[in-house]
Image: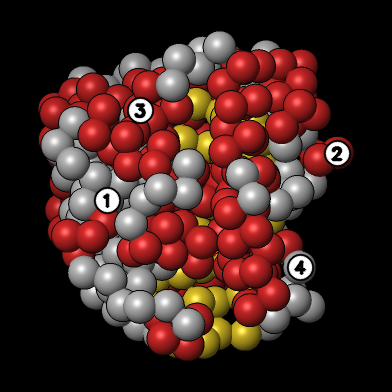
Amino acid sequence: MKNLLYRLFDHQYLGRGEAQNVLADIAAGKYNSEQVSALITVFLMRSISVDELAGFRDALLSLRVPADLSEYKPVDIVGTGGDGKNTFNISTASCFVLAGAGYNVAKHGNYGATSVSGASNVIEQHGVRFTRDVDRLRHSLDACRIAYLHAPLFNPALKAVASIRKNLGVRTFFNLLGPLANPAMPACQLLGVYNLPLFRLYSYAYQASGTRFGVVHSMDGYDEISLTSEFKVAMPDREKVYSPEMLGMTRCREEDLYGGDTPEAASAIFDRVLNNTATAAQRDCVLANAAFAIQVICPEKSIDDCLSEARESLQSGKALSTLRKFIEVNS
């Protein structure tokens, strides 16, 4: 590791194979926490390359506990995290709206590392027990069209660095890897990123992978469609900048989306969204993310039609019924 760190400190980049080997060694516990922290620091000070990102992903996928859910052709909505905004669980709520609208979802997530409440925090707040039993995941999809994959159960490399990430409390390159390492390898994915270089990086990575994708970035730094500013969306055949007003929605303020100071507070907002008793700002940003995920799955649909589907899922109570059934079969 010492020689590797000297190379990185000298502004050199890792090849794809080198990056894969480094992450495999981290997962195997070959480096101490100080060495891993130094490695993480490098990628805080410069951008990760396409080859480095691909190599790290190769390692995660080669080490993962597989979860073959391909027969469901699931979708995932996920953000890289690390935007420093501490929003409530927008992506997770959007996944339940999506499932309520009739689409299969394989949601991959973890505890919050740079925010109070990650997807696993809010799911656990509802009494759900995490599993890597594929039959149980299939049963969940059959019962309510959504399964939850808690990242540390499937990705030993992520588990190996969990305490380091938590203690650092800043975004790391592991934030970038999580969305690419869903062990179900979903057919479709809506990914939010916190800056434009990452927007471009992921767009290239997805184009090469053949995955049906949407990459989104709110121009004021959110890793999701926040409706606080204009936002950019890339899909395989197009790239476009939208404003909240183009969706017929009112522009939000940053404080409208704040998730609170505890996982319990964030969970309460999540519940109000799915009960359709949240504020307009909280509701609309969830609907917007769900709508663009529907368009990833069905690119022939207009965004207005996709918004109508998402809104019907929430207003009819289907999203809430999905959550209740999900809790029932996974508790």
Which of the two labelled residues, at mark 4 and mark 2, occupies the earlier sequence position?
2
The residues bearing labels 2 and 1 have C-alpha atoms spaced at a distance of 33 Å
Please tell me whether residue 285 is drawn above or below residue 237 in the rendered image: above
Q: Mark 3 to mark 1: distance in Å?
A: 13 Å
Q: Position of residue 331 (x, y in %)?
A: 56, 12
Determine which residue is flagged by label 1. Answer: 87
User: In the image, residue 137 lies at what x, y percent?
Assistant: 69, 23
Look at the numbered disc 4 and give the secondary structure of its residue: loop
Q: Residue beneath label 2, please? A: 71
Q: Looking at the rendered structure, which numbered label has been put on residue 10?
A: none
In the structure shown, which secondary structural element does the residue marked by tag 3 occupy? helix
> How far is disc 3 from disc 4 in space, using C-alphas?
30 Å
Q: For residue 219, what is the image quadrant?
A: bottom left
* Image x and y of residue 91, in percent: 46, 50
Residue shown at 18%/41% (left/top)? 260
Q: Amino acid at mark 1?
A: Thr
Residue sitting at x 70%, y 52%: 101
Label 1: how many Cα within 10 Å (few below 14, some 14–19, many 20+): many
Q: Calculate the distance from the C-alpha at mark 4 to the C-alpha at mark 1.
A: 28 Å
Q: To which residue does mark 4 refer? A: 298
Task: Specify the amino acid type for callout 3.
Answer: Asn
Q: Secondary structure at mark 2?
A: helix
Do the numbered discs 4 and 1 sit on residues whose CB atoms are within 8 Å?
A: no
Helix, strand or loop under label 1: loop
Residue of label 3? 121
